[in-house]
Image: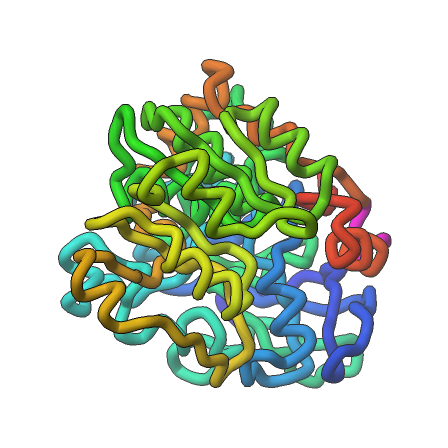
């Protein structure tokens, strides 16, 4: 057996059945091949997408090791890795083929093979890198990482080097949730100075969008949610106005704050009725980005003439339209400068408390759980 194929014992959190709790188990992982890197995971964020996949909103094979906001230290590299080295600190982002038309034009989040790369439960050749304690394969390669584990395999193109002096245990969510909210504002919609912006849902993604809108120079920043503590935090992070949708009509309240509607908006709840209201509350030539994940087949309705006559736009946004190797280091620098304080969103849990973290996230007690895994 080649050294790169040698396996090591690791600890993982496994989903073995639909809507079942995560199970902490022992497993084995093979070494890196080709352009892969083996990363000792220091911490990983727990994202809404992990939970909806656990619950099988998306058809992902089970049993599987999830986790897609990993951060850690490279411990071994495959023979084709050129730009990374053992000891590098990295944040793990999404998987993409790297050579299709969207990838080649800098839009890897729209890779033609995105679903297989991130939700297929295996490598491109159908193989798995993980085995459970009984020697049975575990589905893995979730978002090209499966980082609910003490070690994870990633590819060079989704492992982003970050400065050694940056707080590594904090950085994992930059690989998905934080990148999605901030990138939707900065990369996708390109929110402009002096403009008006509204975000529907003040969770981790929505509040990342609020901070990014402040960085972008929006003059009116509206956060809409049903949890008073989230709305209070939104104000602290840059929202100029907040709307409690339990007591206020969303469309009327938005248009009262920003007469005629908002120039930009982001829907992060995954609820069709909220999207419909968000479209209605757009100004002429306004655009609303959609990042909230819904069950497959979810339908939304809107007045076609409202779009047509007002030049309004709806666009889907995956991973904030980010080139991770460019955008994640930019977010790190903004954080280190005190201009993007996403640490305000975070609560840490040990890996053994992953189910508590998931429940706290579901109940809105915790905005962004991060699982501490290694030192």
Is residue 35 placed above or below 214 in the rendered structure? below
Q: Is residue 352 rendered magenta in the image?
A: yes
Residue nearest the observer in this picture, 236 or 74: 236
Q: Is residue 21 left or right of residue 82?
A: right
From the top left corner, tell me how far across and down residue 14 is, in percent: 73, 71
From the top left corner, tell me how far across and down residue 208 is, in percent: 50, 38
Is residue 270 placed above or below 124 in the rendered structure? above
From the top left corner, tell me how far across and down residue 192 is, in percent: 25, 31
Dominant secondary-structure state across the stretch colored magenta: helix
Q: Residue at x 20, y 50 (%)?
A: 285
From the top left corner, tell me how far across and down residue 69 is, in percent: 56, 51
Task: State the quadrant of the C terminus.
Answer: top right
Q: Is residue 205 visible?
A: yes
Q: Is residue 46 left or right of residue 190?
A: right
Which image quadrant for residue 258? Answer: top left
Q: Is residue 325 visible?
A: no
Which color scheme is applied?
Answer: rainbow
Q: Is residue 200 rendered magenta in the image?
A: no
Q: Residue at x 53, y 78 (%)?
A: 121
Residue nearest the observer in this picture, 138 or 111: 111
Is residue 369 placed above or below 118 in the rendered structure? above
Q: Residue at x 72, y 60 (%)?
A: 10
Q: Residue at x 57, y 51 (%)?
A: 249
Task: Give the extent of the magenta segment.
Answer: 350-354
Residue nearest the observer in this picture, 35 or 263: 263
């Amino acid at each position: 057996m080649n050294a790169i194929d040698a396996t090591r014992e690791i600890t993982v959190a496994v989903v073995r059945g639909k809507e079942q709790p995560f199970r902490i188990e022992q497993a084995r992982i093979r070494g890196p091949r080709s352009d892969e890197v083996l990363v000792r995971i220091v911490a990983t964020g727990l994202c809404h997408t992990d939970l909806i996949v656990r619950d099988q909103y998306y058809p992902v094979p089970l049993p599987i090791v999830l986790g897609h906001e990993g951060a850690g230290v490279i411990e071994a590299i495959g023979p084709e890795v050129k730009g990374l080295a053992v000891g590098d600190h990295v944040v793990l982002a999404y998987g993409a083929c790297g050579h299709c038309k969207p990838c080649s034009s800098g839009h890897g989040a729209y890779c033609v093979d995105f679903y297989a790369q991130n939700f297929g439960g295996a490598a491109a050749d159908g193989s798995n890198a993980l085995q459970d304690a009984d020697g049975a394969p575990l589905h893995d390669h979730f978002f090209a990482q499966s980082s609910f584990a003490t070690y994870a395999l990633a590819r060079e193109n989704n492992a982003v080097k970050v400065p050694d002096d940056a707080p590594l245990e904090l950085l994992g969510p930059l690989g998905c949730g934080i990148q999605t909210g901030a990138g939707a504002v900065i990369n996708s919609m390109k929110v402009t100075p002096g403009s008006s912006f509204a975000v529907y849902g003040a969770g981790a993604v929505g509040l990342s969008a609020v901070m990014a809108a402040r960085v972008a120079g929006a003059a009116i920043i509206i956060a809409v949610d049903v949890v008073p503590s989230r709305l209070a935090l939104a104000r602290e992070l840059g929202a100029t106005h907040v709307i409690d949708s339990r007591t206020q009509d969303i469309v009327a309240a938005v248009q009262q704050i920003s007469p005629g509607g908002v120039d930009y908006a982001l829907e992060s709840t995954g609820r069709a009725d909220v999207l419909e209201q968000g479209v209605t509350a757009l100004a002429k030539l306004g655009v609303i980005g959609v990042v909230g994940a819904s069950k497959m087949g979810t339908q939304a309705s809107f007045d076609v003439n409202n779009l047509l006559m007002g030049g309004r736009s709806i666009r889907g946004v995956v991973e904030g339209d980010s080139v991770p190797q460019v955008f994640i280091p930019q977010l790190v620098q903004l954080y280190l400068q005190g201009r993007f304080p996403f640490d305000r969103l975070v609560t840490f849990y040990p890996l053994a408390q992953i189910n508590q973290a998931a429940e706290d996230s579901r109940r809105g007690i915790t905005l962004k759980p991060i699982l501490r895994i290694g030192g």
